[in-house]
Image (cartoon, rainbow, N blue to C red):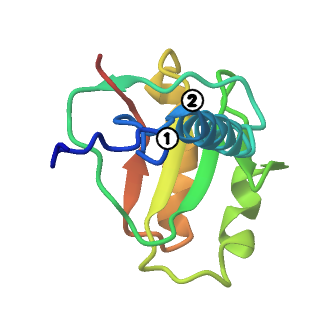
Amino acid sequence: MSRFSIPDDSRRRPDIEPVLPLINVVFLLLIFFMVAGQLAPGLPADVSPPESAAASADSDEPIRLVVDQHGNLFWQDEPMAIADMPDRLDGLRKDRPVQLLTDGSIPVVLLRPALEGLRNAGITEVLLVTRSLP
């Protein structure tokens, strides 16, 4: 009689665990974050910001103003006149920065009235929004 026994292979676990459920979960998470990233509201006007090689600066809850190619001013997706700017921005904290989103091809002549309106409203910090260079 032999003292060596042959182990029963029917109870042994496979060397590699099935990875199909893990792959399914990863793809579902990928799809979720791709869809969630597209849910941000769009801009009220067709604006393509100018490019910049500077690093982006983080700010605390900025006020976002949009100036389109024709010099029209938008705030919270609504058109706003330059003359109404001090009254509409009156209730906001003046130490919060204002993000100014403009088209890259807009001449400074069309941007100047918006900047003067911000100065008249008491805004001390204006950030020009740009795109990073690839």
Name the amino acid, label 1.
Ser
Residue 125 vertical placement versus 16 (above, below): below
Rounded to the nearest whole Å, what is the CA distance between mark 1 and mark 2? 79 Å
Q: Position of residue 60 (x, y in %)?
A: 42, 72
What residue is drawn where x is 42% and y is 79%? 95
* Quarter of the figure with residue 101: top right
Q: Position of residue 67 (x, y in %)?
A: 63, 36
The disc, 1 or 2, on the residue closer to the chain's N-terminal end is: 1
User: Which residue matches tag 1?
Assistant: 10
Q: Position of residue 36 (x, y in %)?
A: 68, 45
How many neighbours does mark 1 have within 10 angstroms: few (below 14), some (14-19), or many (20 or more)? few
What residue is drawn where x is 57% and y is 43%? 113
Question: In the rendered view of the protein, which quadrant contains the C terminus?
Answer: top left
SS at circle 1: loop
> Left or right of 111: which side holds 73?
right
What residue is drawn where x is 43% and y is 66%? 97
Residue 76 vertical placement versus 133 (above, below): below
How many neighbours does mark 2 have within 10 angstroms: few (below 14), some (14-19), or many (20 or more)? some
User: Which residue matches tag 2?
Assistant: 110
